[in-house]
Image (spheres, rainbow, N blue to C red):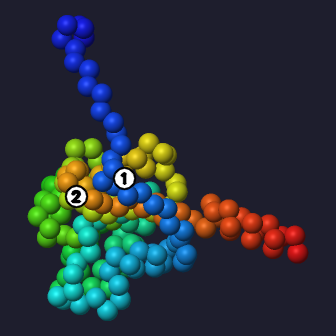
Amino acid sequence: MHSNNLIIIHRSSDCPNIRIGVKKIQYALSSYVDLAFLIPKGWKVGDPPPPKFLIFFDDIQDAIGAANYLRSHLPPELRDKVKWLNSDMTSTFKDEELAQLILGESWGLCTTDSFGMGMDIADIRLIIQWRATCHLETLWQHFGRAVRNRELTGKAVLFVEKDHFDDERMEGCKKSEK
């Protein structure tokens, strides 16, 4: 690189259009009940769909389990609106699913890091990281997938196990003292 051919661009990575939150996981991790708000029980054809979403998991089986849980809340004819995506799938399948998500034919994906770089979708309104198991850099990459269109607003939520919260730790200490 020669300095006469170099352009330096400084741009903040601050994304004021993404609201970031943390939510305590209340139910058993393998139940995925904490994700029920996306598609509440009793959802029926004609009800508004959930916001376009990505849920990141560290484990393929968790992604599949969560997708199946969410799909179980949908009528059979709409269960293909929520899918899982992981590294075991072919590039062709991933490309097709990405196209379905972009077109709005799919509402959301339960995925792993296989939803990689270069998969930019302008209108993903909700990003969820399931469990506090990833590195901070990975978390920011996941959260940065939300609303690439800066005119939209979105949410990024880290769902965290109870034992990471001070109130739960204090309760555990009180129980152990007894």
Whether residue 93 is visible to the viewer of this picture, yes or no, is no
What element does badge 2 sit on?
A: loop
Between marks 2 and 1 in the image, the one whose residue lies nearer the viewer: 2
Distance between the alpha carbons at the discs numbered 2 and 1 = 14 Å
Q: Is 109 placed left or right of 34 in the picture? A: left
Q: Is 154 rendered above or below residue 137?
A: below
Q: Residue at x 26, y 25 (%)?
A: 9
- Percent from the top left, x then y, of residue 127? 34, 60
Residue type beneath disc 1: Phe
**Mark drawn on residue 152:** 2
Residue 143 bears which disc, if any? 1
Placement of the N terminus among the 4 image quadrants = top left
Q: Given the current orientation, which residue lies at the most extreme right position?
A: 178
Identify the residue at horizontal 24%, vertical 67% (top origin): 52
N-term-proximal mark, 2 vs 1: 1
Give the quarter of the image for residue 100: bottom left
The amino acid pointed to by label 2 is Leu
Question: In the image, what residue occupies the spot 39% across and 72% down?
Answer: 66
Q: Quadrant of residue 163?
A: bottom right
Q: Is residue 128 visible?
A: yes
Residue 1, above or below 13: above
Task: Give the residue displayed 40% in from the left and 79% down from the top.
Answer: 36
Which corner quadrant of the image does residue 5 belong to?
top left
Q: Could you tell me residue 38's position as x and y percent?
A: 34, 76
Number of numbered labels in the structure image: 2
Image spot of residue 104 (x, y percent): 14, 68
Q: Is residue 81 above or below residue 147?
A: below
**CB under 8 Å between callouts 2 and 1?**
no
